[in-house]
Each structure stands twice: as structure tokens, then as C-alpha cells.
Image (tube, rainbow, N blue to C red):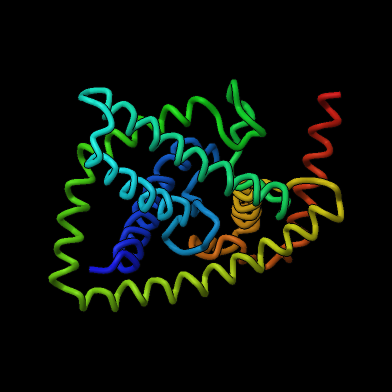
Amino acid sequence: MGIFLTLAFLFFIGSVFGWLLELVYRNLNNKSPGLINPGFCTGPYVPLYGFGLCALFLLAQLEKLNFLSPPWDKLLLFAAMAACMTAIEYIAGIFSLKVLKVRLWDYSRLPGNIQGIICPQFSLAWAALSAVYYFLIHPHIIDALGWLSRNLAFSFVIGMFFGVFIIDFAHSADIVSKLHKFAADNGTVLRYEAVKAHIKERQTELKERYRFFRPFKSQTPLIEHLKEIYAEEKERLGRRQ
């Protein structure tokens, strides 16, 4: 089976299961009632985890080279996986922050963070998750790839996933372009999840229907929500001074 199909399958699995992980984690730490759809896209997938699973799979193949003897080979592997995941997180975060003027996540309250994008705590979490991946998930990934090689018709489903994903990505990019324009015009940075949470809270107050997979859909224009968020942020900063 070709490497392209292998990585496409892994991206599909990682994106979907990563979305489930983010859904649980973010909503456990969410103070507002109800669930908020996590991630950049509106569908049930987080591309960051898709790229991450592809990277973890490729790094796991390096074990065959036998650089070190046990257990140092495993520790080096987990450190490399954690460094790779941290690098992916930083690249995605710095691009969204510096280019799009949108903060997709915020670690600024955690000690040792770098620009609120990465921090030692989450790098350690990536190392722990890498160990979980290697011992508990990687063997099942190998089995799943074996199943895919015997059932190549499933590649049609993978193709459908990427078709929907590309359309969703374009739609989400259009929303981000509007957020970027507002942020650039007002010299601020918008927090992506905070915008979604604000819209949800306003919809609850106005008894509007909340669309989980269309979190930016509202009877109130998006620009009005952004103005409210900007005004609230200025007021909050004013109270600190």
C-alpha cells in the first residue's frame, strides 16, 4: 500500500479522534453551559491531530534503526515525538497568531509558556501521550493499515472525507479572513474559541437556536459580535490598569 494512502488514512483517523479528545478536554474546562465545537473547522475533525498522528507513525518507524539499547531507545523516541508535536503546535499557532491575527488556543496563563502557543506542561503531556500512542495505539494502527490494504474500497470513504474537509476548510478560512480583517483594523488579536463562546452565550440570552456544527451562524451579524468582544476586552484591560 502506498505511503500517500497510508498517510491519508492516518490523517483521517487522527483528525476525527483528535476532535473527540478536544471536545472532552475543552468542554471540561468550559465555564459556560453546553458543548462548544472545538477546532478551526466546523466539522468533527481537528487537522492538527491528523498531522500529529502522521508524524508519530513515521517517528515510530525509526525504532527499527536501533540507535540505543532499551530503555533509552524508548525515552529518546518519546522525546522526539514530544518535540515534533510541540513543533507542529508552535508552527500552527504562530501562523494563526502572526498572519491571521487569530489565537486558536491560549497557554499564556501557564508558567514557562512561549507566546501563549506552547508550554512545558503541554510538551510533557505530548511526551506522555506519545508513550500512550506507542504502547496502546500504534499496534492497532498497524492492524488498521493491514485491514485497509485488504479492503481498499474504504479509500472511497477517505476520499469523501477529504472532499468534505476541503470544503469545510475553505468555509472556515473565509470566517478567519473576516476575523483577521477586524483584528487588523482594530490592532487586536481575537481568540477563536472565545468568539465561538461569545456567540453561543448571546444566542442563549436571545433564545436563538445554537448550531453546534455552525458555531458562527447567528441572527446577529458576525461584525456585531466582534465589536462586543472588542469592547468587553477593552473594558477588562481598563479595569486592570
Question: How many discs appear?
Answer: 0
From what the image shows, is residue 42 above or below residue 74?
below
Picture quadrant of residue 130: top left
Position of 123 compared to 102: left or right?
left
Q: Please name the residue shown 39% across and 43% down the image.
A: 24
- In the image, 227 versus 171, the foreground residue is 171
Q: Quadrant of residue 28?
A: top left
Q: Residue at x 54, y 61 (%)?
A: 210
Position of residue 131 in the picture relative to residue 214 (left or right): left
Judge by depth and name the residue closer to the eye, 63 or 55: 63
Q: Position of residue 128 (x, y in %)?
A: 34, 30
186 vs 82, left or right, is right
User: To which quarter of the image does residue 179 belong?
Assistant: bottom right
> Residue 53 at what x, y percent from top left?
36, 50
At which x and y percent is residue 136? Answer: 20, 40
Residue 166 in the image: above or below residue 125: below
Q: Where does the C terminus fall, quadrant-wise? A: top right
Q: Which residue sits at x=60%, y=59%?
A: 207
| The one of 83 and 108 positioned closer to us in this rendering | 83
